Image (spheres, helix red, strand yellow):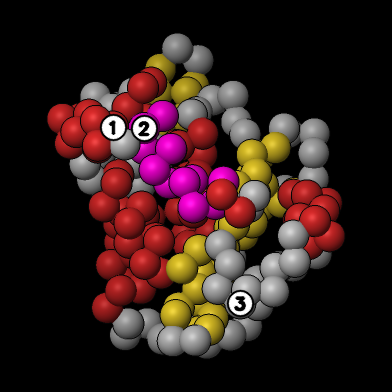
């Protein structure tokens, strides 16, 4: 089941779009645990681990990222044996997604990275492999992102452009700035 219409034309001259792709693909902050070592997704050495952002600091970022989604029940991490498509259908039954500006993240958790890393990883994969669509609703650009591997859906993410820009801001914070963010909450 294809979630995104990848046949839609993308306006590549959008400044925000190019910034989002550069930040979330070429400078993806994720690393994957391979054995006892971590390997950065981006070769630019800008992962959370490179910046000494681990454990509690990653949890603070995750809390900030999912805040508005948890409130409406559209932040859904699932186990590897569950199906993203089924959870989306369940979500449609429970919560009427009648707000055309709704946002959601449904993704399979990974044992080789944190939840925070996984979200950035799935966003990166969607852009890197062209599995995304940009729609405009009420003057808001909304990104529908799909990450799949071996014909298995790993994540469906639907976020406003301003939310993606906030995620970029969050992943570029220093450890000290994240501690300050935690104190303000």
Quarter of the image with the C terminus is top left
Q: Does residue 97 appear to the left or right of 37 in the view shown?
A: right
Q: What's the distance in space between the residues labelled 3 and 1, CA to CA?
A: 31 Å
For residue 39, which numbered disc appears in the image? none
Q: Mark 2: which secondary structure?
A: helix
* Residue 21 shows in this picture: no
Which residue occupies 64% across, 39% down?
77
Callout 2 environment at 10 Å: few (<14), some (14 to 19), or many (20+)? some
Badge 3 or badge 2: first in the primary sequence: 2
Direction from residue 1 to residue 73 in the image, left or right: left
Q: Position of residue 119 (x, y in %)?
A: 50, 44
- Which quadrant would the N terminus be assigned to in this image? bottom right
Relative image position of residue 117 (x, y in whole percent)? 45, 37
Reply above or below: 133 against 158.
Answer: below
The residue identified by callout 2 is 60
> Residue at position x 51%, y 34% from top?
115
Q: Secondary structure of the magenta portion, mostly?
A: helix
**From where the camera sits, is residue 86 visible?**
yes
The tag on residue 100 is: 3
Q: CA distance from mark 1 to mark 2?
A: 6 Å
Image vertical order of residue 107 relative to residue 130, above or below: above
Q: Give the magenta part as a residue range.
A: 59-70
On whether residue 50 falls in the magenta region, the answer is no
Residue bearing the label numbered 1? 182
Q: Would you say 49 lies left or right of 62 here?
A: left
């Amino acid at each position: 089941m294809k979630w995104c219409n990848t046949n839609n034309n993308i306006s590549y001259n959008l400044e925000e779009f190019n910034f989002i792709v550069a930040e979330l693909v070429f400078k993806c902050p994720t690393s994957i645990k391979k054995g006892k070592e971590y390997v950065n997704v981006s070769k630019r050495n800008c992962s959370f681990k490179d910046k000494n952002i681990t454990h509690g600091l990653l949890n603070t970022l995750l809390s900030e990222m999912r805040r508005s989604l948890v409130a409406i029940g559209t932040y859904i991490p699932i186990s590897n044996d569950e199906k993203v498509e089924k959870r989306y259908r369940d979500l449609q039954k429970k919560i009427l997604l009648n707000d055309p500006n709704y946002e959601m993240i449904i993704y399979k958790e990974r044992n080789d990275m944190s939840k925070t890393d996984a979200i950035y990883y799935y966003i990166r994969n969607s852009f890197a492999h062209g599995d995304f669509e940009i729609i405009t609703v009420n003057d808001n650009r909304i990104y529908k992102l799909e990450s799949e591997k071996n014909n298995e859906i790993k994540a469906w993410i639907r976020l406003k452009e301003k939310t993606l820009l906030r995620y970029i801001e969050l992943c570029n914070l220093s450890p000290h700035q994240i501690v300050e963010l935690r104190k303000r909450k």
